[in-house]
């Protein structure tokens, strides 16, 4: 635990399969998944992780049945309203990435209020990826850069990686050092595609509703054992 990542990102997967294995509805899995969010956020703050990003709702999740989407939106609002006191008590700042314009108004209002209410907190940054997609984020970045080029604020041949990074939704966050995915699936599913270029990937068979501090610590221990070279050799990185 003496080599903690600065930024941990988690693909929270397996709510539906967790519920199906117990003969329940998908909504049961999502409710238990919300409890796992509370556990993991609390654990990450206590461990000392500076940045935690959770893949809460993808751009593709809008294609799910309307009843399931509505349940997820209700759970999001409940989290926003219920966790305000704890986030402030623990010094956690809330931010979001993604296309928030697609979120219903009854979600955007409380969400914006909580972002503002926790803005001054410096203990940890919790980022919720909502209506988010990595490809969609890159497209928005390209559009911003194209407008800048048309306006004469940047020359196309002068555009560098740093310009793209500053045009992405995640421009206020450091790149993720560790990406965790639960439920046994081993893919990024359109999550932080640009930002995770050199992230360490950790996959676990544990379903998200069962994920807790011990599983987070196991992922952090695995991360600490890895040698990050960023395309070079150990000596050059050192």
Image: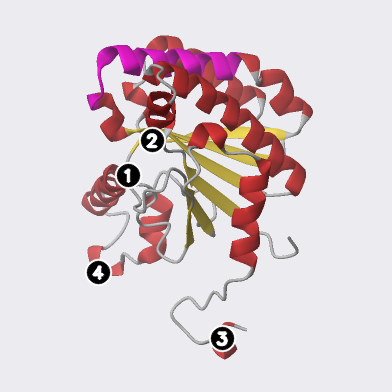
Left or right of 67, for residue 96: right
Separation of disc 3 and disc 1 at Cα? 32 Å
Disc 4 is placed on an element classified as: helix
Q: Are marks 4 and 1 in contact (CB under 8 Å)?
A: no
Separation of disc 2 and disc 1 at Cα? 7 Å
Q: Are marks 2 and 4 in contact (CB under 8 Å)?
A: no
Separation of disc 4 and disc 1 at Cα? 22 Å
Dot 4 or dot 1, earlier in sequence: 1
Disc 3 is placed on an element classified as: helix
- Neighbor class of circle 1 (other Cα within 10 Å; few <14, some 14-19, many 20+) is many
Q: Are marks 2 and 1 in contact (CB under 8 Å)?
A: yes
| Coordinates of residue 103 in the picture (x, y in percent) | 36, 20
What's the residue at 51%, 15% (across, down)? 77
Q: Is residue 123 something that shows in the picture?
A: no
Dot 2 or dot 4, earlier in sequence: 2
Residue 73 in magenta? yes
- Neighbor class of circle 2 (other Cα within 10 Å; few <14, some 14-19, many 20+) is many
Q: Please give the label number shown on residue 234.
A: 3
| Coordinates of residue 235 in the picture (x, y in percent) | 58, 90
| Magenta part of the chain | 63-81
Dot 2 or dot 1, earlier in sequence: 2
| Coordinates of residue 186 in the picture (x, y in percent) | 36, 53
Which quadrant: the N terminus?
bottom right
- Most frequent secondary structure within the magenta stretch: helix
Separation of disc 2 and disc 4 at Cα? 28 Å
Residue tagged by mark 4?
157
Residue tagged by mark 1?
137
Dot 3 or dot 1, earlier in sequence: 1
């Amino acid at each position: 635990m003496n080599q903690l990542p600065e930024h941990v990102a988690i693909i929270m997967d397996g709510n539906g399969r967790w519920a199906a294995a117990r003969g329940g509805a998908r909504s049961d899995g999502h409710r238990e998944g919300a409890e796992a969010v509370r556990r993991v956020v609390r654990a990450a703050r206590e461990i000392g992780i500076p940045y935690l990003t959770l893949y809460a709702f993808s751009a593709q999740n809008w294609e799910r049945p309307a009843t399931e989407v509505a349940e997820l939106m209700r759970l999001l609002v409940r989290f926003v309203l219920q966790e305000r006191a704890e986030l402030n008590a623990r010094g956690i700042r809330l931010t979001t990435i993604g296309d928030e314009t697609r979120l219903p108004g009854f979600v955007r209002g409380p969400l914006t209020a909580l972002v503002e209410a926790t803005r001054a907190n410096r203990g940890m940054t919790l980022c919720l990826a909502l209506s988010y997609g990595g490809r969609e984020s890159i497209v928005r970045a390209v559009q911003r850069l194209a407008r800048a080029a048309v306006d004469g604020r940047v020359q196309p041949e002068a555009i560098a990686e740093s310009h793209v990074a500053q045009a992405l939704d995640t421009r206020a966050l450091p790149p993720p050092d560790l990406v965790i995915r639960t439920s046994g699936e081993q893919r990024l599913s359109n999550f932080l595609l640009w930002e995770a270029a050199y992230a360490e990937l950790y996959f676990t068979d544990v379903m998200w509703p069962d994920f807790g501090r011990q599983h987070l610590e196991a992922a952090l221990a695995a991360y600490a054992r890895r040698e990050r070279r960023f395309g070079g050799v150990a000596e050059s990185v050192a």
